[in-house]
Image (cartoon, grey):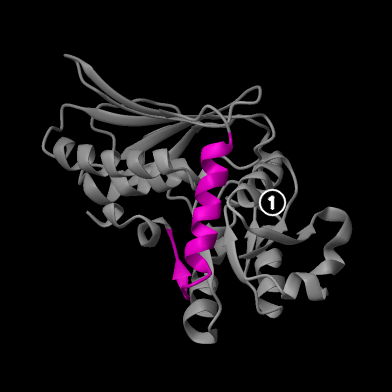
Amino acid sequence: MKIALIGYGKMGKEIERIARSRGHEITCIIDMDNRQDFQSPAFRDADVAIEFTNPTSAYDNCLQAFEAGVKVVSGSTGWMEQHDHEMRRLCTEQGHTLFWSSNFSLGVAIFSAVNRYLARIMDNFPAYDVSMTETHHIHKLDAPSGTAITLAEDIIHTIDRKKVWKLAEAPLPARELACPSGVSPLPTGEEPGERLQGSTALLITSVRKGEVPGIHSIRYDSEADSITITHDAKNRSGFALGAVLAAEYTATHTGYLGMSDLFPFLHE
């Protein structure tokens, strides 16, 4: 398979290493200083482009790839909240292909399934309040993480007493964050960071420190005890392998794709 890389930071380099180890060819690498290569024959020759950049450029990167007739696997977060509807339309009405996920790790896919299963159980036990903490490296600009949002939305869709998620604590000055617009506010009388038993808001605390690849913890707390599930990424290799597996899947499929297409157990 011929792969183009969009973004050549630490993730891009790890994806390149794993892709080559699986016998794939890297036909083109696009970074900040050679964006004109979207129009190059080498880019157009790719079966799939894997895009890991940032919230401010991911949307345009996808549009440029679509214009070149190249399918895209994107792991950039902090932009789909605004552009999800358009991306779906471009895939369903204009024949483009995008595989997007907030997290490509197999471990996170399993963790997501466990999260939904536990939420179904805890919907019956209102004495437990649920909250989340996500920790990432200091270079990550969006908060909460895309993975945290996906996990939170799964909880909200499952637990009737939770209606919205709310960022409890910003890890960086607001101007540096790519927080999604349109986040539902806390119900009247509740303040950010306030923990209220029976609150309809699921509070997410975001922490940015060091070079942490990603830690997500979901905690159910009652007066009697607490239950916590955690996914702790040790390095970027799990994310990179998942992105390459997604590219292998995308090469032979079309439309608006996601991890539930790649891993059928996520439908359960």
Q: Position of residue 76 (x, y in %)?
A: 60, 52
Is residue 25 left or right of 192 when viewed as pictured? right
Residue type, numbered disc 1: Thr
Query: Is residue 163 visible to the viewer in this orientation of the structure?
Result: no
Spot occupied by residue 182 in the image (x, y as percentages of width and height): 50, 55
Which residue corresponds to the image point at 43% horizontal and 60% vertical from the top-left?
258
Q: Is residue 8 visible?
A: yes
Q: Nearer the viewer, residue 128 or 120?
A: 120
Q: Residues within 10 Å of mark 1 (few under 14, many from 20)?
A: many
Please tell me which residue is depicted at 36% across the width and 49% down the height of the picture: 153
Farthest-out residue, front: 23
Chain part drawn in magenta: 236-258
Q: Is residue 252 highlighted in magenta?
A: yes
Q: Quadrant of the C terminus?
A: bottom left
Main secondary structure type of the part rendered in magenta: helix
Camera-nearest residue between 24 and 128: 24
Image spot of residue 4 (x, y percent): 70, 62
199 is higher (above) or lower (below) than 25: above
Q: Nearer the viewer, residue 102 or 1?
A: 1
Q: Secondary structure at mark 1?
A: loop
48 relative to 241, above or below:
below
User: Mark 1 sits on what residue?
Assistant: 53
When asked about the image quadrant of residue 116, the answer is top left
